[in-house]
């Protein structure tokens, strides 16, 4: 298994950052994302992220609002991402009133692409999500 780990600090309140990153149904349409849907709520909820004619189908595996942590997995083998057996965790740790650390860690088997390319694709998703939370919460 390949692991991608992105750990970044944000100069914002941990709860405000968690409100964004912990919102499993909070994916925004725009950029490469052309459609988004969410079926169910809480653990077991399934979201479908459409990028052009391809879908990424993910299930929320674990959710702990108090610990500000969640785990999700990609369900479909025909995902446009060059990965299989993918699962990831997001954790937001308070570093004081207006500072926090985000840990986004995923593991997968590269599929249809070299490991470096699969790693690059996954890392860009994590850094992009953290950048969005930073932009929306930093004063």
Image (cartoon, rainbow, N blue to C red):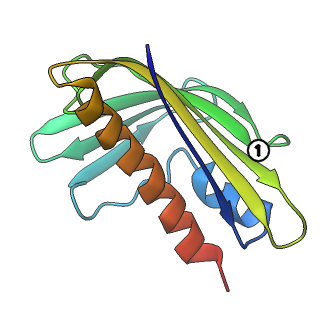
Give the side of residue 45 with respect to residue 27, left or right. Answer: right
Task: Please tell me which residue is depicted at 15% across the width and 36% down the height of the picture.
Answer: 54
Say which quarter of the image contains residue 13. bottom right
**Quadrant location of the N terminus?**
top left
Placement of 60 over or under 135, stated as above or below = above
Residue closest to the eye, 12 or 18: 12
Q: Secondary structure at mark 1?
A: loop
Give the side of residue 91 with respect to residue 47, left or right. Answer: right
**Quadrant location of the C terminus?**
bottom right
Residue closest to the eye, 1 or 51: 1
Tell how many labels.
1
Determine crowd level at label 1: few under 14, some 14-19, many 20+ residues with C-alpha closer than 10 A: many
Give the side of residue 52 with respect to residue 28, left or right. Answer: left
Q: Residue furthest left?
A: 53
Q: Which residue is mark 1?
A: 68
Say which quarter of the image contains residue 5. top right
Residue 58 lies, in percent from the top left, at 41, 29
Placement of 84 over or under 19, stated as above or below = above
Task: Please tell me which residue is depicted at 17% across the width and 25% down the height of the picture.
Answer: 113
Residue 134 lies, in percent from the top left, at 58, 70
């Amino acid at each position: 298994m390949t692991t991608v780990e992105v750990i970044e600090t944000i100069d914002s309140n941990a709860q405000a950052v968690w409100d964004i990153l912990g919102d499993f149904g909070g994916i925004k349409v725009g950029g490469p994302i052309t459609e988004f849907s969410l079926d169910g709520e809480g653990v077991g909820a399934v979201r479908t992220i459409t990028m052009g004619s391809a879908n990424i189908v993910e299930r929320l595996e674990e959710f702990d609002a108090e610990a500000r942590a969640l785990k999700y997995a990609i369900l479909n083998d025909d995902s446009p991402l060059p990965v299989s057996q993918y699962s990831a965790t997001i954790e937001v740790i308070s570093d004081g009133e207006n500072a926090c650390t985000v840990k986004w860690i995923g593991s997968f088997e590269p599929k249809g692409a070299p490991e470096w390319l699969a790693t690059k694709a996954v890392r860009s998703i994590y850094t992009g999500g953290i950048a969005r939370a930073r932009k929306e919460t930093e004063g």
